[in-house]
Amino acid sequence: MSSVLELQAAKVAIGQSGQEGTKGIFPLDVDKIVTIANMKVGAYTIAAQPTAPCLINVTNTVVDTADTMGTIVIVGTDINGAALTEVVIPVANTAVYTTKEFASITSATGAGWVIGGATADTITIGVGSVIAGDGYYFAAIQVLASAVVASQTNKTGSIVAQLSDFTAVPAGLYPTKLTQIALTSGEAIGFLSRI
């Protein structure tokens, strides 16, 4: 911002966008939901719940190349408490994300896995980035505790500051036009606005 008037205008715009709602943004945690476990056919033990609605990630670690990967069925609820189910197809040694945000996890169940060798592959299930949702974008991010931004996705056609380029983003208010954001540390609130 180059002037006091611009800063005041940004605050007004952010205040108006807050009428559309807010979302908590917390750090990525690759094993928050299911800590490292051998792949299997059956239910995994849920270790913890997401702190706020977010994408869920499943990471497969190949231990034995003779194993055959299956799927993980994630069951839970969305931000409104409605039932939500998504099937995740793991990729070797890679984090794969759900396409929907989960506010809570009821179960995570493996299906179709085949242990072909002496040792089973492992998986972790964790919390990922936060999305604004269909028809919305984050008009601003309020960083509450100094944050490191892992990644951000800008609203199509918009040019905004690449917060992910900074070593750390200090506490403060940042006008943005983001549809998705992930933190590696810190804590923030995203202010929603309609597209």
Image (cartoon, rainbow, N blue to C red):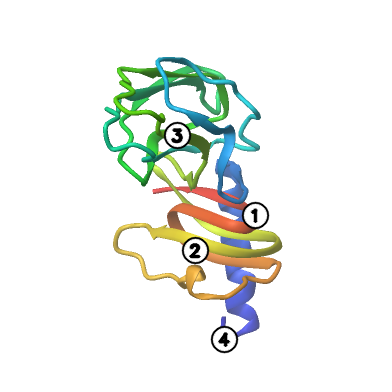
- Mark 4 or mark 1: whose residue is earlier in sequence: 4
In what element is the residue under mark 3? strand
Which of discs 3 and 1 lies nearer the camera? The answer is: 3
Q: Could you classify mark 1 by the number of other residues whose Cα lies within 10 Å: few (under 14), some (14-19), or many (20 or more)? A: many
Residue closest to the eye, 4 or 164: 164
Residue type at mark 1 is Ala
> CB under 8 Å between callouts 4 and 1?
no
CA gap, disc 4 and disc 1: 24 Å
CA gap, disc 3 and disc 1: 31 Å
> Residue 166, located in which quarter of the rendered image?
bottom right
In the rendered image, residue 2, in percent from the top left (x then y), is placed at 57, 86
Q: Could you classify mark 4 by the number of other residues whose Cα lies within 10 Å: few (under 14), some (14-19), or many (20 or more)? A: few
Which of discs 4 and 3 lies nearer the camera? The answer is: 3
Give the residue at mark 4: 2
Residue closest to the eye, 6 or 86: 86
Q: Is residue 56 above or below residue 44?
A: below
- Mark 3 or mark 1: whose residue is earlier in sequence: 3
- Mark 4 or mark 2: whose residue is earlier in sequence: 4
Q: Could you classify mark 2 by the number of other residues whose Cα lies within 10 Å: few (under 14), some (14-19), or many (20 or more)? A: many
- Mark 3 or mark 2: whose residue is earlier in sequence: 3
In what element is the residue under mark 2? strand
Which of discs 1 and 2 lies nearer the camera? The answer is: 1
Residue type at mark 2 is Thr
> CB under 8 Å between callouts 3 and 2?
no
> CB under 8 Å between callouts 1 and 2?
no
Give the residue at mark 3: 122
In what element is the residue under mark 1? strand
Give the residue at mark 2: 176
In the picture, the disc for residue 188 is: 1
In the rendered image, residue 147, in percent from the top left (x then y), is placed at 64, 63
| In the displayed structure image, the side of residue 106 where residue 63 appears, left or right | left
